[in-house]
Image (tube, rainbow, N blue to C red):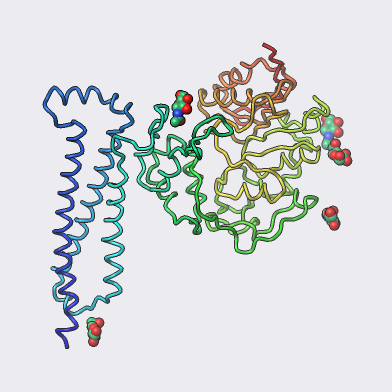
């Protein structure tokens, strides 16, 4: 009886041993096969040939064959196999050491199966897929020399990312509505630097529920992996989504707590986000979730001359301000006030520690989930107004700011207003930043510089873009 019950353990140890041998063999085979691949790519041909190949790397690339990506991929597979082998060896060693336990403890067949599945078959499968995915020199399906291999494709192993960035040919080889032969889905080039995170983001079962990982998505975006790939999984929603309040109530009321998924925040409801709570979990726009405070903004005379009233700014161009962008971080109060003046404002929003996007949307306003990294998704000369507050401060690099301001200038229409609201920086930087704003030769309607603290100053301005009939 005793003998019988212990039998599976012996088998496990023996199987482990065999697995080790098999894996060792696999590693050797993979090494050899990758060597052969390099050989066939001309890497180990006689000397002159080799030199020619190395100096001619660029040509290889132009042929649509990405040697670096190939060697990266092979390297990755080897690493995977090596770490698997090490893990198995370690396990076997442990078993040897605790020989006594080995006889005493039973491992259930279920555990055994789970171990094989998770620790052995999974990694082997991934390594196998990675090898399969190497694209060899002759890329099939090139109909035209205009079709190039997608430059990032060999960088990624996760099948879903590769599917996403592979150019999609139009059906029947036709020209599509844009006049092009295929559609390229785009991702930010910095995605390459965040390969591990992006692969985690794109690792899901198609059609199933996504992980609750909007914060991973946002982290990728702010780090330059912007645009992010789309996904084919179902986004989770809050458990009991209540219908939003009607617009005559929603603008100035804290939304229902149940309409937000709170799991990735420190707080679990809107009350908790109050500035009085030291553990609220965010540091930008403190107090923006308190409606009594928000109601005072831009409508009551403030003690600071750098605060302008909405009515005064709109009076500069009566009836002309209809659409605009609020670039900053907040809960949409500027847009809410402007809505009362029949002006439609889109508010940029990032969920930096608090549900800013959800809050704006639940108030009945439009949140635009975007970062500083990208060109604004508006056409040239279209916006009546750009308002900015609480975001671009003295931390910002001057060159970055230049690119951003030129982009704002692009989307503002002639006669449109740029409202810089409480920009602040150190006194010694003020001249540089003033130059930034003045270089566009906008008409100055308002321009106020005031003290913020001993070393810092505020700058507020309302500037009008001139006509550019060139
Ligand atoms: C091992 O399994 C046998 C029967 O399968 C059982 O009688 C025995 O108690 C188990 N030993 C331990 C340590 O769980
Ligand atoms: C290849 O491109 C040329 C223009 O560069 C076009 O006239 C031709 O139709 C294309 N052929 C195919 C098969 O797409
Ligand atoms: C909002 O409008 C609805 C009808 O559109 C009305 O029944 C409700 O009383 C209004 N609420 C407030 C606070 O005015
Ligand atoms: C703000 O102050 C100005 C004069 O300084 C006054 O005319 C105006 O009515 C005040 N507005 C509000 C909303 O208190
Ligand atoms: C906004 O539009 C509504 C309906 O057209 C109008 O009744 C209201 O007076 C307008 N509000 C302002 C501030 O112009």
- The residue closer to the viewer here, 103 or 396, is 103
Q: Is residue 217 above or below residue 12?
A: above
Q: Is residue 357 above or below residue 50?
A: below
Farthest bottom residue in view:
1
The picture quadrant where one finds residue 114 is bottom left
| Label tally | 0
Q: Residue at x 63, y 34 (%)?
A: 327
Q: Quadrant of the N terminus?
A: bottom left
- The residue closer to the viewer here, 433 or 332, is 332
Farthest front residue in view:
172
Tell me where residue 392 appears, x and y as whole percent: 58, 31
- The residue closer to the viewer here, 171 or 22, is 171
Q: Quadrant of the C terminus?
A: top right
Judge left or right: residue 172 versus residue 296. left
Q: Residue at x 78, y 52 (%)?
A: 249
Q: Residue at x 42, y 36 (%)?
A: 190
The picture quadrant where one finds residue 150 is top left
Tell me where residue 370 appears, x and y as whole percent: 57, 39
Tell me where residue 421 appears, x and y as whole percent: 67, 31
Judge left or right: residue 140 versus residue 29. right
Q: Which quadrant of the figure shows ligand 1?
A: bottom left
Judge left or right: residue 470 versus residue 82. right
Q: Residue at x 83, y 29 (%)?
A: 319
Farthest top residue in view:
470
Judge left or right: residue 66 versus residue 49. right
Tell me where residue 188 appears, x and y as whole percent: 46, 36
The picture quadrant where one finds residue 123 is bottom left
């Amino acid at each position: 009886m005793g003998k019988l019950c212990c039998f599976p353990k012996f088998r496990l140890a023996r199987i482990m041993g065999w697995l080790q041998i098999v894996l060792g063999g696999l590693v050797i085979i993979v090494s050899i096969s990758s060597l052969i691949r390099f050989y066939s790519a001309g890497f180990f041909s006689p000397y002159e040939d080799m030199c020619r190949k190395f100096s001619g790397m660029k040509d290889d690339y132009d042929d649509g064959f990405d040697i670096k990506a190939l060697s990266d991929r092979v390297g990755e597979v080897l690493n995977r196999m090596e770490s698997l082998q090490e893990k198995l060896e370690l396990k076997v060693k442990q078993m040897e050491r605790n020989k006594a336990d080995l006889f005493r403890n039973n491992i259930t067949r279920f555990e055994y199966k789970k171990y094989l599945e998770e620790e052995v078959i999974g990694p082997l499968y991934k390594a196998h897929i990675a090898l399969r995915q190497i694209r060899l020199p002759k890329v099939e399906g090139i109909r035209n020399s205009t079709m190039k291999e997608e430059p990032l494709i060999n960088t990624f192993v996760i099948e879903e990312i590769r599917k996403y960035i592979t150019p999609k040919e139009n059906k029947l080889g036709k020209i599509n509505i844009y006049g092009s032969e295929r559609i390229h889905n785009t991702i930010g080039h910095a995605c390459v630097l965040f390969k591990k995170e992006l692969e985690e983001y794109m690792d899901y079962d198609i059609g199933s529920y996504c992980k609750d990982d909007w914060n991973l998505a946002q982290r990728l975006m702010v780090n330059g992996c912007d645009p992010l790939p789309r996904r084919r999984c179902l986004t989770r929603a809050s458990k009991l989504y209540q219908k939003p309040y009607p617009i005559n109530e929603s603008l100035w009321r804290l939304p229902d707590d149940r309409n937000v998924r709170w799991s990735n925040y420190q707080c679990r409801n809107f009350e908790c986000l109050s500035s009085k709570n030291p553990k609220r979990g965010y540091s930008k726009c403190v107090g923006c979730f308190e409606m009594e405070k928000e109601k005072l903004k831009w409508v009551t005379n403030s003690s600071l001359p750098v605060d302008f009233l909405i009515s005064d700014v709109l009076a500069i161009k009566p009836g002309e301000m209809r659409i605009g962008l609020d670039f900053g971080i907040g809960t949409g109060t500027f847009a809410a006030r402007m809505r009362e003046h029949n002006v439609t404002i889109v508010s940029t929003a990032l969920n930096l520690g608090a549900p800013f996007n959800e809050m704006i949307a639940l108030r009945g306003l439009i949140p635009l989930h975007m970062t500083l990294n990208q060109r604004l998704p508006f056409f040239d000369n279209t916006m009546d107004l750009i308002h900015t507050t609480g975001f671009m401060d003295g931390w910002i690099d001057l060159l970055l700011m230049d690119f951003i301001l030129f982009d704002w200038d692009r989307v503002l229409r002639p006669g449109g207003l740029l409202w810089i609201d409480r920009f602040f920086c150190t006194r010694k930087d003020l001249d540089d930043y003033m130059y930034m704003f003045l270089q566009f030769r906008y008409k100055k309607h308002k321009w106020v510089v005031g003290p913020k603290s001993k070393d810092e100053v505020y700058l507020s301005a309302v500037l009008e873009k001139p006509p550019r009939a060139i």
